[in-house]
Image (tube, grey):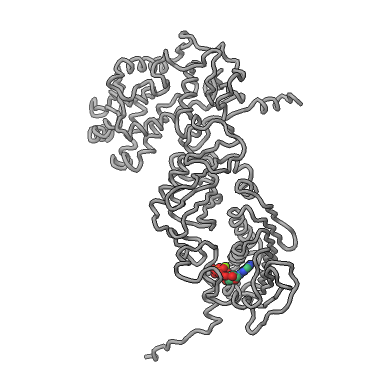
Amino acid sequence: MPSPPHINLLPDLLISQIAAGEVVERPASVLKELLENALDAGSTTIQIQLEEGGVKLIRISDDGCGIARDELALALTRHATSKIASLEDLERVGTLGFRGEALASVAAVARVTLTSRQQGAPHAWRLAGEPGATPEPAALLAGTVVEMRDLYYNTPARRKFLKSEATEYAHCIDAVKRIALAHPGVAFTLSHNGRVSLHLAKSDARGRAGAILGDDFLAESRAVDTGGGHAQGIRLTGHCALPAHSRARSDAQYCYVNGRFVRDKLLTHALREAYQDMLHGSRYPAYCVFLEVDPASVDVNVHPAKTEVRFRDGRAVHQFVYHAVQRTLSASLAAHPASTGDTGSGTDDGAAQYRSGAPLPGGAPTAGSERPAFTHYAPRQESLRVSEPAVASYFAFAQNARADAASARFNASDAFAPAGTPGALPSPAPGGDDGAPLGYAVAQLHGIYVLAQNAQGLVLVDMHAAHERILYEKLKSAWDERAVATQALLIPAVFAAEPLDVAASEEHADALRELGFDIAPMGPAQLAVRAVPALLQAADPAALARSLLVELREHGVTQLLAARRNELLATMACHGAVRARRQLSVPEMNALLRQMEETERSDQCNHGRPTWTQLSLAELDRLFLRGR
Ligand SMILES: Nc1ncnc2c1ncn2[C@@H]1O[C@H](COP(=O)(O)OP(=O)(O)OP(=O)(O)O)[C@@H](O)[C@H]1O
Ligand SMILES: [Mg+2]
């Protein structure tokens, strides 16, 4: 039997090299640590020079507070920090660094030199990070220069894990962008192999987001700002791209806690949930959000790279973020009259700025402003020309529903006409001006698009997508309130069904009733739909019932009514929504527009596509080279 092993103390250098493994994974992680130090030192201008993807050289020059001559050596020593001194400090750490480990770790695996000059010092001092080195006088106007050369020169095994220069450089750019997004007031210049590749001037949060994520991102997103004044000083700011501008990859998700970039499951989940209803499962939302919380309510000392945090009250944070983002995305058009330009300023919880690129139409035009010339479309009752049987049946039902409106909490005309009766379909009052954001219908194009005129110009609506969203939202609230009104069909819709469908319809009759359906067997292979949800009476009852039964057989009733509820309601909404090539009257189109204005999240359909867009007069003028 071999003799038992002895326990030895490891040499200091080896200890440092092992510890460094946690902090220094690749050049980008060195860069991150050095940038964080420069920011903690209060710098406002930071220059980054890289060579060979940061493997050969990383040099950071800052204009921060500097390091005193006698503390240069300490800065390179493990567990030496100027940022915390006690456990209490650690519990409410406000700086990016706090462990006193980064520089020592870097110095253990690369050649490091510090050059620094504090304010008032006669000159700068330089210290090489080698054993026994002493500070020497050096030339530097102010601030600190940290130089790292030859990463892993002394640990060749680790060097092998580095990727190509281009890859390492790409990671470095990422690191700079992440940090720069959270520090808009600091100017950054990045150069690689002697060439400047990124310059970010001092800016504000919005300007910086535009500089890094692109103006497209800004145009496609809404600003979120919950304002301060919440419990634990919690606040969320930033920008969230509209669902229509989601991506195939999760590469545009930036999430910060107290200025620190984090990959936090809880926050990612809250954000994902906020988009959930508006985004196809395989798409990723784009966002850049900053959460500020009382430092005492979050533990940042969880992960070696400090990219994970732990909240004292995770649930509350989750709820807060979820609601803030969800409200921002779903704020209905009507609730947000035209807003242009930057707000950036603190607004309330629901703050949702509809951004240029898809500018908010209308808003209330000021008194006396020119009214759009659509008065000749002012509807007369005859304009309720019904051109298709389905629409006819829709109005027939609307009438029926009105007849027993007393009993039906959710009456059929809700499907389309907010005012409740065809006769009361809203329309522009001649000469009046109620400033409807989406304007008033002027025509229908190819049975697919509704064309409307508002103060800005032309509004184009995908009528099926828009109606689908409206129905979906209505179904959800009806379902939440357990108030899905049922509409009995005058003539039951009978259709051939598989025996398993017949069995399912019998077995789950109660659940189907809860959903607003009455589906009864007519024989071993026949079903009859006798009632459908009032909201969906324009749908083909048999097709609706069939897809419901498919879902029911596939997922089971419990799943369907809970986890898959939204998918189910979305499918139902799709069936109920007005089909392409169905001709709508002007009052019907106006009713649709008004419903869109009232419906949350009506700007995108259930699959995240936009439901409408605006073409301004200026854009139209440009098409015709007018005014040039
Ligand atoms: N650019 C700089 N300007 C001024 N002081 C600096 C700079 N870089 C480092 N220092 C000083 O050196 C100390 C050690 O830095 P180091 O990054 O190793 O630890 P830290 O930032 O305190 O904690 P962490 O390990 O979490 O980063 C810092 O506490 C700070 O006082
Ligand atoms: Mg540090």
Quarter holding the N terminus is: bottom left
Residue 265, x across and y down, in percent: 44, 55
Q: Residue at x 48, y 30 (%)?
A: 465
Q: Is residue 523 above or below residue 428?
A: below
Quarter holding the C terminus is: top right
Q: Residue at x 31, y 37 (%)?
A: 552
Q: Is residue 567 left or right of residue 188?
A: left
Question: Does residue 24 appear in the picture of this structure?
Answer: no
Answer with the quarter of the image where residue 567 lies. top left
Residue 410, x across and y down, in percent: 33, 25
Question: Does residue 542 appear in the picture of this structure?
Answer: yes
Q: Residue at x 44, y 60 (%)?
A: 296
Nearer to the camera, 546 or 511: 511
Q: Is residue 305 above or below residue 561?
A: below
Q: Is residue 495 above or below residue 238?
A: above
- Image mark count: 0
Nearer to the camera, 530 or 38: 38
Nearer to the camera, 464 or 473: 473
Classify the position of ligand 2 by quadrant: top left, top right, bottom left or bottom right. bottom right
Residue 103, x across and y down, in percent: 59, 72
Nearer to the camera, 445 or 495: 445
